[in-house]
Image (cartoon, grey):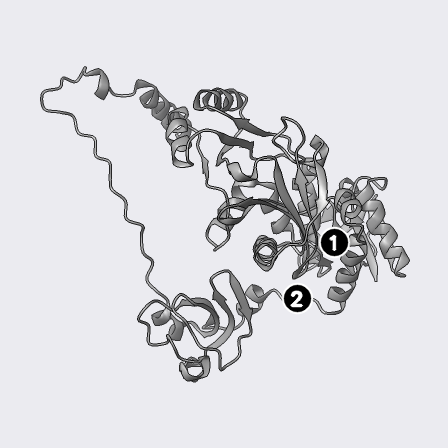
């Protein structure tokens, strides 16, 4: 196998270990500086140049893209994808994981635990937002940041307001997140490769520091995760489009809570803590995938007119509850069950004699017209509208119902810019 490692530093511990592991296994490997590429675009012929020379063929690419070069790095990675070179992590996965808000938005629609989080821009929304996540203390996070940088703990509502106001004045976007008290000063890093957790460690903060990152002085200890934590980490990485990832989780009373998913997880801390050859596991996984690459199902389905993939829900009272898949009649309708989701459990290619239960979700492939009637109608969460009416006895100068002149001026400026 000829492997390219995208990294700006050959002396970085993780890059050095991955290169060393590849050479030990007899693979050809080169570390290529991410910023030294040139992307050439031509009809039917995407291409790459490296240091002004045409790039030779590679079987696989392992991206170690730094946060400061995410945009260009993911563009290079995307070009490798267009050239049908196997990429350990997808360009979309790297981009999504780097944006804390985007990654939580993606995870929030799945049955995966995440800390209650809110994102606001208007300063008047700050207090209600803090209340919605459970009140002070709260965690305040910058949308982009690594190694614990840009993560703050606000002990009171007043301090939270002051911190957010300061950051927003510096054009920084922030998340307000529930503080999980029972996990204060500690978290779990699970290292995911493919469909398994190959190593895990618990990080514990020292002294008054609430951030447990190793770069902040946190100490580590190896830990064996139970199935719930393992499956949560694996599913989170897969949903994000990452085959190699470091998944950070909080140990809450409600189970694992995903804090962050890292697309370029460091090896130094977890290898020294667990004494495992994680770099070797990563290289072995890549070599296996090069010989048996995955197919982008979405692209292939575009040539199957009228066919597609849809998720079918089995609600209470459904005719399918209590029936085996083979007795449900789905196959008679030319519908194939690819995956069964039951709570947090994922069952790929379920057996035909598996009995369906209320709450199951079936990922099916077949004729879209036949599946349309089986897909539940979208329901909106009921909200109680807050209607503010001006009392009949109040004058237009009533201070509690004055028109917000600041908003009016902003709207006028917006209309002027738009025109």
Question: Which residue is located at x 84 percent, y 59 percent?
Answer: 2
Residue hosting label 1: 47
Q: Is residue 32 left or right of residue 383?
A: right
345 or 65, which is in the foreground? 345
Mark with earlier residue (1, 2): 1
Numbered circle sitting on residue 252:
none
Q: Position of residue 217 (x, y in %)?
A: 72, 31
Query: Label 1 neighbourhood size at 10 Å, few (<14), some (14-19), many (20+)?
Result: some
| Residue 300: quarter of image | bottom right
Please say if 113 is above or below 177.
Answer: below
Seen in the picture, residue 338 relative to 241 is either above or below; the reply is below
Residue 53 visible within the image: no
User: In the rendering, at what x and y percent does residue 131 appear?
Assistant: 38, 32
Residue hosting label 2? 294
User: Given this view, does label 1 or label 2 mark the residue nearer the observer?
Assistant: 2
The quarter of the image holding the N terminus is bottom right
Res 155 visible: yes
Q: If the image is split into quadrants, where does the C terminus sit?
A: top left
**Residue situated in front as seen by the camera: 402 or 220:** 220
Q: Picture coordinates of residue 279 (x, y %)?
A: 80, 53
Q: Give the quarter of the image for residue 330.
A: bottom left
Taking the image as shown, residue 106 lies to the left or right of residue 405, namely right
Residue at 80% of width from left, 58% of height from top?
Answer: 58
Task: Give the distance between the C-alpha atoms of the residues marked 1 and 2, in whole angstroms.
Answer: 22 Å
Residue located 64% across and 50% down the image:
91
């Amino acid at each position: 196998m000829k492997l390219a490692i995208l990294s700006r530093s050959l002396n970085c511990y993780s890059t050095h270990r991955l290169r060393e592991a590849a050479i030990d296994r007899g693979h050809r490997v080169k570390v290529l500086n991410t910023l030294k590429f040139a992307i050439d675009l031509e009809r039917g012929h995407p291409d790459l140049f490296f240091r002004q020379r045409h790039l030779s063929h590679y079987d696989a690419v392992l991206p170690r893209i730094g946060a400061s070069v995410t945009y260009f790095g993911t563009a290079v990675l995307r070009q490798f994808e267009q050239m049908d070179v196997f990429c350990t992590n997808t360009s979309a996965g790297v981009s999504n994981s780097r944006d804390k808000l985007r990654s939580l938005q993606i995870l929030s629609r799945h049955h995966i635990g995440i800390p209650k989080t809110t994102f606001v821009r208007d300063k008047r929304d700050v207090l209600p937002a803090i209340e919605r996540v459970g009140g002070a203390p709260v965690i305040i996070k910058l949308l982009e940041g690594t190694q614990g940088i840009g993560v703050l703990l606000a002990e009171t509502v007043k301090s939270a307001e002051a911190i957010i106001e300061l950051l927003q004045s510096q054009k920084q976007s922030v998340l307000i997140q529930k503080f999980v008290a029972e996990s204060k000063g500690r978290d779990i890093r699970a290292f995911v490769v493919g469909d398994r957790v190959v190593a895990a460690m618990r990080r514990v903060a020292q002294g008054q520091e609430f951030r447990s990152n190793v770069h902040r002085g946190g100490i580590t200890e190896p830990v064996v995760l139970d199935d719930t934590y393992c499956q949560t980490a694996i599913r989170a990485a897969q949903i994000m489009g990452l085959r190699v990832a470091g998944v950070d989780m909080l140990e809450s009373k409600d189970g694992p809570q995903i804090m962050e998913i890292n697309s370029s997880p460091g090896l130094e801390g977890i290898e020294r803590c667990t004494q495992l050859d994680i770099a070797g596991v990563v290289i072995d996984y890549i070599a296996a995938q090069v010989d048996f690459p995955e197919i982008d199902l979405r692209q292939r389905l575009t040539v199957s007119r009228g066919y597609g993939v849809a998720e079918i829900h089995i609600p209470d009272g459904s005719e399918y509850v209590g029936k085996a898949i083979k007795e449900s009649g789905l196959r008679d309708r030319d519908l194939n069950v690819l995956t069964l989701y039951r709570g947090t459990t994922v069952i790929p290619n379920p057996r035909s004699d598996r009995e369906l239960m209320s709450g199951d979700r079936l990922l099916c492939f077949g004729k879209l017209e036949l599946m349309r009637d089986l897909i539940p109608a979208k329901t909106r969460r009921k909200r109680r509208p807050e209607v503010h009416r001006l009392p009949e006895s109040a004058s237009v100068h009533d201070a509690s119902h004055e028109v917000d002149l600041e908003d009016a001026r902003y709207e006028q400026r917006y209309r002027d810019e738009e025109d």
